[in-house]
Image (cartoon, rainbow, N blue to C red):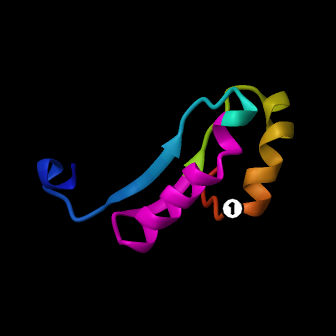
Amino acid sequence: SLNRLEMDCVDLIQIHGADREAQVNSDELWEAFTRARDAGKARFNGLSVNRHPKLTHHRRPILTHPCMVV
């Protein structure tokens, strides 16, 4: 929790090493990221992938959700 970290907010909430389309196409996930950012609990949200070919199925969330870091 932010209290345990003794912080008001974190800089980044990120999906790391996403390798399945379902992991990044979840509207609930992106809505939760947006709520955390809007509530001032996180400054940015994003996702990371390990291999370039995976980017093809990540295009939808990148283009349709406010992903700030890729």
Q: Secondary structure at mark 1?
A: loop
Residue at the farthest front position = 28
What's the residue type where badge 1 is placed? His
Taking the spot 83% from the left edge, 38% from the top edge, the residue there is 57
Query: Which x, y percent locates residue 24?
Result: 67, 42
Q: Is residue 56 left or right of residue 6?
A: right
Q: Looking at the image, how many numbered discs can be counted on the residues?
A: 1
Q: Nearer the viewer, residue 22 or 16?
A: 22
Query: Which x, y percent locates residue 69?
Result: 60, 54
Q: What stretch of residues is rendered in magenta?
A: 23-45
Q: Tell me the quarter of the picture where residue 16 sits.
A: top right
Q: Nearer the viewer, residue 67 or 52?
A: 67
Vertical relation: 37 (above or below) 15: below
Q: Is residue 42 left or right of residue 52?
A: left
Taking the spot 61% from the left edge, 61% from the top edge, the residue there is 68
Q: Main secondary structure of the magenta part?
A: helix
In the rendered image, residue 26 lying in the magenta stretch gets the answer yes
Query: Which x, y percent locates residue 20?
Result: 71, 28
Vertical relation: 49 (above or below) 67: above
In the rendered image, residue 38 lying in the magenta stretch gets the answer yes
Taking the spot 65% from the left edge, 53% from the top edge, the residue there is 27
- To which residue does mark 1 refer? 65
Taking the spot 21% from the left edge, 54% from the top edge, the residue there is 2
Q: Nearer the viewer, residue 22 or 41?
A: 22
Q: Residues within 10 Å of mark 1 (few under 14, many from 20)?
A: some
Query: Which x, y percent locates residue 4?
Result: 13, 48
Q: Is residue 14 left or right of residue 57?
A: left
Vertical relation: 16 (above or below) 30: above
Q: Tell me the quarter of the picture where residue 36 sits.
A: bottom left
